[in-house]
Amino acid sequence: MRDLETYIALNRFGLGMNADDIANTGGSPRDWIKAQINSKFLTPEALTSMPSAANVMRDYYSMRYATKAGSDKRRQANQLRKKDFNAAAMARMMYKVTTPSPVSERFTQFWANHFTVSRTRGQIGYAIPAYETEAIRPHIFSKFENLLIAAVTHPVMLIYLDNIQSIGPNSKRGRKREKDLNENLAREVLELHTLGVNGGYSQEDIIEFAKILTGWSVRKFRNGRDPNGGQQTKRGEVSFTYANHEPGPKTVLGRTYPGDGPKDLVKALRAIAVHPSTAKHIAGKLARHFISDTPDPADIDALADVYMKTGGDLGKVSLALVDLDSVWAQPMPKLKQPEDLVLAVLRADPSNKKITRKIRQAKLDQSLKAMGQDLFRAPSPAGWPEETDRWLSPESLVHRIEWVRAYASKMSPTVNPDDLFEATIATVADAATKRTIRGAPSREDAIALIFSSSAFQRR
Amino acid sequence: MSMITRRTFTRSGVALLGASAFARGPVSFAKAPTDKRLIVVVLRGAMDGLHAVVPYADRDYGKLRRSLTMTKPGGKNPVIDLDGSFGLHPKLAALKPLYDAKEVAFIPAASTQYRARSHFEAQNMLETLGSAPYARKTGWLNRTLLAMNTGDVRMGLALGPSIPLILFGEAGVRTHSESRLPEVTEDFMDRINAMYDNDPAFHKAISQALEEKEMAAGKMSGGMMSGADMSETMSGDTMSAMDDMRLRPNNLGDTTLAAATLLKDPDGPRVAVIEAGGWDTHFGQERRLSALFSDLSGGIVSIKSEMGDAWKDTAVVVVSEFGRTARENGSNGTDHGTGGLAIVAGGSVTGGSVMGTWPGLSSRALFEDRDLMPTTHIEGIFKTLLRDHMGLSESALADQVFPDLGHIKPMRGLIRA
């Protein structure tokens, strides 16, 4: 590995590097990236075969409503749910460690974080891997509106941002029970998912959009059909509850929707998706994630331009990102977030045949928590912070070092640190890094130093 | 520190972590082909043999070592005399009674065939004993177990969370670990700090982390700064902070005790490997080695006392991947060298002497005018231990254990006839 472009491709756009990854780039790193901006890698059998989010929620509701708190039955039900979740989380991690298309995974992570859902809302926790598989993965290289619709109308999002509690004040149930709107999802869609905080919407737009969202709910009890229409739905699936839906026309961002039930939401999301503010917001987020905390405004404009010209085609926007000159130059100012650091280490381990065991042994969930990234538990709907400073705290760095040191001691004693160095950071390691690694007093120390180096941790 | 702490280890608490042994049905540990025990202590980072067994009578010694120099008994910085020419570092005093009982031999100027100075290449050589670094994929002690036909009964024991390369291979090996994770040592953090030199953000973060630790350590210890031991050349405040942290260099005391407890069991393992880090003393050598020597000598003594009757059947060999420069460097330390020190102890050892050929310390006598010239093959010491102590046949040694070392003869006179 003597090639800066390869290093950049595999780290800035991938999940770190190993000898196979280098070979896969085939000497043409840019083409290697572009080939992965393709939906064919996004829905592997290993993930789609896991329980659906609707089934996870069904199991949750049946536990919650059919067993008593503190009872043995509830404990058993919860253990089964936890087992399913662990299997799904492991399958997800395994796929990320072994996939030959790490670029697709990076974009998946970006969009899953853009549309964050979090275990901070306990009831949805075990459904988050399924949410990623269903709402995020299939759509990240299609039109943004498809991704937006899939995420916003997913049961996990509707629960996470309280839309299932939102009731139109003039709806049947609102009039009867004096319940009211919950603006949470409406606000976050406009502020976080689409237009951005200064994207040109008013409080009135939020309220009107919240009204459009009323009725979008999740079936908690038995399978069935809403008495006022719609399809037959199963427990745990999204169902449109007419009794909660605010009647009458609503006006969002100057456009009026007639008030005909669930169709308004899809129309409104499509309109918001191609708003210039949305283009700018998403272009900025992509640039800050993949390039730098302070990207060149010209780069953001270029991406936003492609977004607008293609009607929000994320595949085209992603390709345009790869073709920016600035992504192919040093410095590499970003830091791998803890999950990506762990993935990079696992992927770099040439003896990762017994990967499942290694993932368990490495106690990843606890370690990631110590490093500041409790998996599936982002602190807010805004997701994990993007700024490098937020991740490079003294405490977090020490936890990173402790984890890689422990991991290095578990690696096969046949791993040659010189080979590992060549396959990872040789191109960009500075003199101090090279000298320190070369002078390491043991193989394990040398490996741990490679993983601890800023060349390995940055991207 | 000759007292060995039983802080974490009790006999009743001995747990073999190699639980997978039982997956193949009940495994008999009783079928050991020999009563002899071999403990190999690998000191990673390269021990400075000249600072352990000091050639105080060599007239060139004082020219090479200035801040690190030690003197004849009765002098200003006296060693513990062994034979009128060599003396022990005071922190190795616990080994003197063993020496007097002819149960420990010191072999200066010992080295493997490896002549470059990379730690991990050298350790790879020490552990695989192939024709070159990375040429063989298995450890020679594992090949020893195969030659002893102990593959199924798991006569090998690794003290630590993982199996080191020296014991790695086809034969089953048990592991015993005192702590869940290896500690991140002071030495390792020193290196991390040096590595982040050119990345200001990383450097700032690690400096802050170390300062916080220093403050915590200062509170606990009441401030145990020792000015005399401080490194003078390591840059900046953080190095001072690191020097003062005084993390435990390693768990050698606890580990040796655990090894002995497991090995003395008639149905227990027969070959154990103990690893200890922290020996790469490029700076602040006296302070760092003082702590390590205490641990090492205390550990060897604890093996003897814990083994009881089995001590007569035991050999302990202490080796490092290479030695260090004969001259001290500019930071009260020493750099990577060649000829090192091997220590062989045990009831079956012909101890009580400094063995091998002393090459001398004159400029011409040094290897590349820098390192102690190797005169004893470490491989030969291992051959003797396997043949004369463990009872392996010549053909097993030649064919199975050391196929690349036909040209090296076993060291003579090391094991009691």
Image: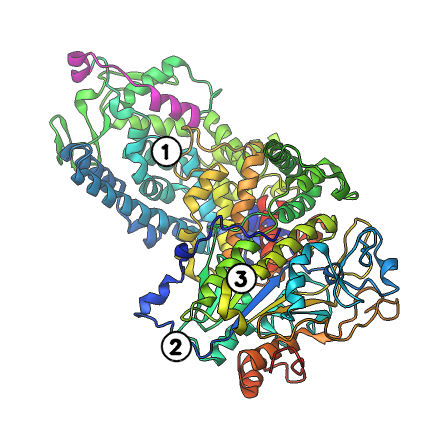
Closest to the observer: A160 or B397?
B397
Subunit bearing disc 2 = B
Residue A347 visible in the picture: yes
Residue A194 visible in the picture: no
The residue wearing badge 3 is B305
Dividing the picture into quarters, in which one does residue A292 lie? top right
Q: Residue at x 33, y 66 (%)?
A: B22
The picture places residue A306, in percent across and down from the top left corner, at 51, 36
Q: Quadrant of the N terminus of chain A?
A: bottom right
Which residues are drawn in magenta? A171-192
The residue wearing badge 1 is A117
Most common secondary structure along the magenta stretch: helix
Q: Say which mark, if any, is on residue B269.
A: none
Question: Looking at the image, is A182 positioned above or below residue B298?
Answer: above
Query: For the residues tagged 2 and 3, is the chain the same?
Result: yes
Closest to the observer: A37 or B171?
B171
The picture places residue B1, in percent across and down from the top left corner, at 62, 51
Subunit bearing disc 3 = B
The residue at the far bottom in this view is B395
Are there few (<14), some (14-19), or many (20+) residues within 10 Å of tag 3? some
Question: Looking at the image, is B74 positioned above or below residue B315?
Answer: above
The residue wearing badge 2 is B31
Identify the secondary structure beneath mark 1.
loop
